[in-house]
Amino acid sequence: MMAVLGMAPALGCGGETGGTVDATGDPATGPGGGSNMTCGHASFPSDAMLYQDISGAAVDVESGTILGALDGRGWGDQGDRQTLGIDFSFEVNCAASSVARRMYTQDGDNQPDCDLAPVPLPDGGKIEGAGDYTCSGGDCHLIVYQGSRIYELYQASVTGGTFTGTCLAIWDLARDYWSASNLSPGYSRGDTCDGGTAADLPIAPMLLTSEELAAALAGDGIIHHALRFTLKNNRIRATGYVHPATHYGFGGTTGGSDTLPTGARLRLRKD
């Protein structure tokens, strides 16, 4: 799990025009990876990294050291969360093609990392941890599927006529961002690029939904995609990341060299 360090030139992330991306798109077609269908769309091609079977993958040379250290002092602090986090506070919104897109005002200076494009806001939608589009504090991720795009906006809030957000990542559901044959303009949305999360990985396709859990229990009992998880910041390496991540917390994470880097993949034991 060697961390990827260093800086890249200040290129636009996501799209090819300095932080913008084509925000339109026809509905995604063709099979997705296993059970991962959301809002009627397949999320990325079936051979994308989030569908890879890593049960037989080689173990990283740092694996024993990192997992041993975490097991030794715990995966979280006493009085706080002491396990891997699987967050159920996310809201995934589905927008019909007729739903108009609305431009947001960006809070702070996060360019050239963020996509600058209008975002669909379906009636009755919600952001993470809220009953509507109003953020009262926290991450407040807005996740919307429309056509062949996922819009993921960090710290989104709609109050009256004001729509604000910190950083937007728009993901093309038909593209394999992590394939060696599809690396223009760079790996994923670009190395060192921030996005809707510190790792700049898509959120929605790696969530576990009640619908796919029910389908798995009625079928082969398998969730056929990687699951997103979080740890407390002091259990995540302070600097560096590993692919498929392209970014790390820059001051938010405080762990030492024996903690997990952003983007690390864990393999569940059979027991």
Image (cartoon, grey):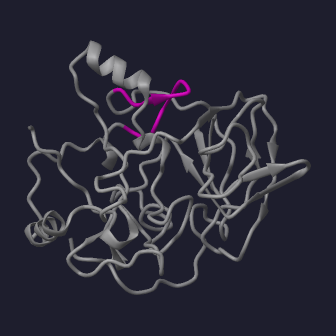
Residue at coordinates 8% horizontally, 38% vertically from top-left? Answer: 271
| Residue placed most toward the observer, 58 or 157 | 157
Q: Is residue 9 placed above or below 77 in the rendered structure?
A: below
Relative to 106, 235 lies left or right: left
Relative to 271, 228 lies left or right: right
Q: Quadrant of the rendered structure where residue 244 is?
A: bottom left
Q: Position of residue 216 (x, y in %)?
A: 29, 21
| Residue placed most toward the observer, 175 or 205 | 205
* Residue stretch in magenta: 35-45
Q: Is residue 95 placed above or below 14 in the rendered structure?
A: above
Relative to 154, 236 lies left or right: left
The quadrant of the picture occupied by the N terminus is bottom left
Residue at coordinates 66% horizontally, 42% vertically from top-left? Answer: 130
Q: Position of residue 164 (x, y in %)?
A: 78, 58
Relative to 257, 64 lies left or right: left
Q: Is residue 152 magenta?
A: no
Q: Is residue 229 placed above or below 39 in the rendered structure?
A: below
Residue at coordinates 19% horizontally, 66% vertically from top-left? Answer: 70
